[in-house]
Image (cartoon, rainbow, N blue to C red):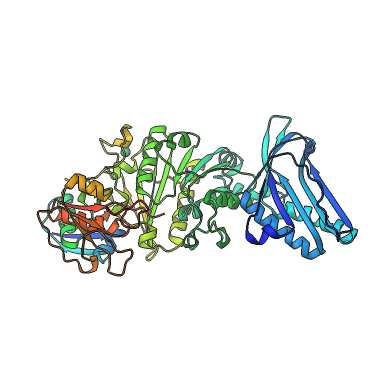
Amino acid sequence: MKIKVRYFAVLRDRRGVGEELIETDVRTVRELVESLIRQHSLGLPPSLIRAAVNGSFANDGDKLSDGDEVVLLPPVSGG
Amino acid sequence: MKSCSCRRCRGARTVFSLTPEPISATAREVPSAGGFVSFEGKVRDHAGGRQVLRLEYEAFDELAVSEGELLCQEAMQRFRLLDVRVIHRTGRLEIGETAVLIQVAAAHRKAAFEGCEWLIDELKKRVPIWKKEFYADGDSGWVAVEPVAPIDERFYERQLRLPEVGEAGQQRLREARVLLVGVGGLASGSLPYLAAAGIGTIGLVDDDVVDVSNLHRQILYRAQDEGKIKVERAAEFAKRLNPTINITTIPYKLSKININELVEQFDWVVDGTDSLEVKFLLNAACKRLRKPFTTASVHRFEGQILTVMPDGPCLQCLFPETPPDACVGTCAEEGVLGLTPGLFGILQANEVLKGLLGYGEVLSQELMLFDLRTGESQRLARQKREYCPACQGDYKMPSNDLEVATLEEAQAKLGEFRLVDVRESDELPRLKVKHEVSPLSRFTWEPSETPTVFICAHGVRSYQVASQCRAQGISNAYSLAGGVLNPSFKEPV
Ligand SMILES: [Zn+2]
């Protein structure tokens, strides 16, 4: 299935792009986060990356479907 | 008695000083002077038709002294004075006490009279000293010694016209008490607008002093403020903008010890810090004490903002595990455009005003993202988490097993370990203790049975590397918290 992934803050810096369309066979939000961390050296544990699916924050176990838009949010500290 | 102690002023005959003690002084001898004029300003028992019982003067000490000294020097030149002395009281004064003493000496009496009169007029306009009048009717109020333009209802005229504000709304703002934690880039956006809107009491917490590298984004400060206490300078900025409001300055670091006591005294807390630890600490305290809490964070050209209401989802509902500060860089390490925190500070002020005046809805169920490069904003819905430590009131300070606090702790915890420096080869100071080098830009490190502690400048890159190792299944990788540039970093001998 195809999923649109948007990266925020330090994740955007480390991934090198703000958003991308990916082809994946992961089933859950947690699996997606883990696979992106491994693939792109995002340098954060999965517990510190929050995912919002189609405009709402999601839980680790939530299932993903074709065409979903996922926003990945790291903690942000700057002020 | 405080007076300017810079080298230039110490030898000169001009002296401007502040004192909490009753003023008594005799004129200094100046053999070449033929005219000595002395002026005493005293506390009188009425002001603006109201009976005054007593007064309190508050000064921003360093600034008052440095501006007072400049004023004295200017008077010396303008009127060719031979000596100038100005002493201003601070603290509580009773009726009839001397509030200010001005003594000048000149070759002839005309210059002495003129110089003295000019000094008292200019002093009232230019030196930041504030007066709190205690009236017979039990009321009290801070007034500028002599505001350049009198503050009256015209100050709020344009916002009073909004049906969402009006007299009732303005009164709510006047009665509101807002705490700003961290007086940096975010507060540079929020404080001016909260002060100008007429928030009656604003508390400022920050233990930092102004650094030149702050100025591109922390526009509350001026270049000459370097080294000055931030909360004092920020309070001065706000009081100059709107002398009718109360500013409380708290020049301390917010901690577990003082947080409850501070938050309790206010109606709304605005987080302007760049520390994840403080953000989560504040979130938990505000939840516990049922105070609305607005937090924002920025990163380069983007940022996020949300408001936590007493019964709504909180920051910890979003991130259940308190992130260590090292997991992402701060402005210091990552860089940030000055207006990014400024814009998010303004959005924070908007949250407070929305909440107090009731226009629109606060971001209590959402998190808003905004990107200054594209102008794109996004609102993501947040929910309460079933088990949230902050919402349940059993918040604990974060701990994580990825970081070690010191090399001694690493030794004690891990036994023998490899120390790997991931900084670039031109970063100083280099380590003296036995270590390997593998800069992040060309990282070539092979895991082994022996645990590894990564080290960098601030503990951000080393956290990133250690975290990435864990993600690849290497469980014996650690990061030295704070890095080489942490003031408490020590190499074992
Ligand atoms: Zn919560």
Judging depth in this view, the residue of A73 and B483 nearest the camera is B483
Quadrant placement of the N terminus of chain B: top right
Question: Percent position (x, y) of residue B16?
Answer: 71, 53
Question: Which one is in front, B242 or A29?
Answer: B242
The quadrant where residue A44 appears: bottom left
Whole-percent x, y for residue A8 in the image = 30, 58
Q: Is residue A74 above or below residue B137?
A: below
Q: Could you tell me which residue is drawn at 64 percent across and 44 percent down?
A: B244
| Residue B74 falls left or right of residue B352 | right
- Residue B94 seen in the figure: yes
Which x, y percent locates residue B476? 15, 51
Residue B312 appears in which quarter of the rendering?
Answer: top left
Residue B32 vs residue B87, the one in the foreground: B32
Q: Is residue B263 left or right of residue A18?
A: right
Question: What x and y, as percent, mark residue B321?
Answer: 26, 43
Q: Nearer the viewer, residue B112 or A72?
A: B112
Instruction: Name the residue furthest front.
Output: B493
Q: Residue at x 73, y 34 (%)?
A: B54
Instruction: Report if residue A52 is visible in the image.
Output: no
Residue at 21 percent of width and 60 percent of height: B435
Q: Is residue B176 above or below residue B433?
A: above
Q: Quadrant of ligand 1?
A: top left
Left or right: B271 with respect to B86? left
